[in-house]
Image: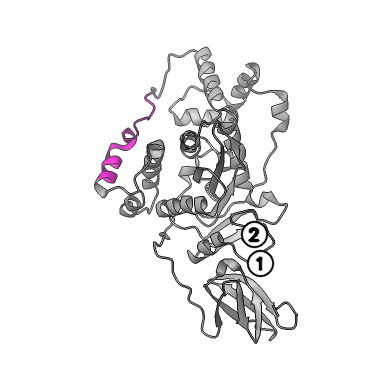
Amino acid sequence: MPWNESNRMSLRRDFLALCEQPGVNISELCRRFEISRKTGYKWLARGKEALADQSRRPHSSPERTPAKIEAVILATRDQYRDWGARKLKRYLENKGRRDLPSVSTITQILHRHGRITPDASQAAQPWQRFEHPEPNHLWQMDYKGHVAMTQGRVHPLTVLDDHSRFNLVLAACARESMQEVQAALIACFRRYGLPHRISCDNGSPWGNTRGEVGLTHLGVWITRLGIRLTHARPGHPQTNGKDERFHRTLKSGVLQRQVFTDLANAQRAFDAFRDVYNHERPHQALDLDVPISRYRPSQRPYPEVLPQPEYESGSTVRKVSKNGLIHFNGRRYRIAKALDGQQVAIMPDADNDSLYTVYFFQTAVRKLDLRLDDFID
């Protein structure tokens, strides 16, 4: 699939940054980014010059006066209005400036020029953080509600790596549907590989909102890829807190700053924001490193043909019917309509002969207790 013009430079930047990570297979990375090895090595040889929009600002300006330094700080703050003094300082240092004042002085400059209000200072609260030890151990996925456009509405779909905070997907979707999520995930999986687990909330299309039992069709597809799909507890959005925090940054950085004319216009704005977020914006939770510095592509490639389940010997294998039912021990049990035509395994409990667990691949989808009347007549 050729790169769209709107995200071509952002993806090229991802490619160059990931090539610098230790242990990365350059040939495999070229394949995932759909470029030839010749092109990949040409970009590597050119380095940052391969980025057409790379800044040509001089790395140092010793002749600048303090007033000019303040002007640079204020201009950067005006461009990124939700960044504090520490982010601004690290960002400008990463751009090559070595004449910046201390963080406390930058904070005073922002206060003095009205860029930080007392209410904003009071609202800033510390976060208690936990992160997985490696990239791709856990991805968090969600929609950022919907936003009105000149023509219709856009539903921003986001996927964030838990360890690195690297934003993998930021897609302007027309609706919250399985088809749009699946298309965005396939493109993501082909480029970055498969995670071990994806966490999301209980809403559609990845959760059952109608009280149905078991997996959704999207959940079945994700599970067949060998990815563990988990859901946040109802009423506990902090389970996916990093993606929720990303949504706040997206809202202040893009959604509140412009009105989109259509989906293509929204996607161009999302691509530009994603590029800055992953490559330039210092992240406080990463000791002011940028997310791309912590991310590595997954070693698990996306399989173009979905695998079939392989269950342990000793398990009872059943095919799920069109109505989401299986027959076991002379009775019918409801499993999940989304598993229509799929094979599941029934494993006995080691300590209780009346208890069984129904598995789809490695995911437990149902508990059976033969002593209870929870079967279908």
For the point 60% across and 68% down, which residue is it?
Answer: 337
Q: Position of residue 237 (x, y in %)?
A: 68, 49
Give SS at disc 1.
loop
Q: Is residue 357 left or right of residue 97?
A: right
Give SS at disc 2.
loop
Looking at the rendered structure, the kind of residue marked 2 is Asn
Q: Which corner quadrant of the image does residue 47 belong to?
A: top left
For the point 63% across and 50% down, which residue is it?
Answer: 240
Q: Is residue 41 above or below residue 203?
A: above
Q: Residue furthest toward the left?
A: 38
Q: Is residue 159 magenta?
A: no
Q: Is residue 353 above or below residue 115?
A: below
Marks 1 and 2, how far apart at CA: 8 Å
Q: Is residue 88 above or below residue 270?
A: above
Viewer-proximal residue among 302 and 118: 302
Looking at the rendered structure, the kind of residue marked 1 is Val
Q: Which residues are magenta?
A: 39-56
Q: Which residue is mark 2?
A: 208
Q: Position of residue 265 (x, y in %)?
A: 48, 33
Q: Main secondary structure of the magenta part?
A: helix
Identify the mark nearer the N-term, 1 or 2.
2
Q: Is residue 42 magenta?
A: yes
Q: Which residue is mark 1?
A: 213
Give the number of callouts: 2
Picture colour scheme = one colour
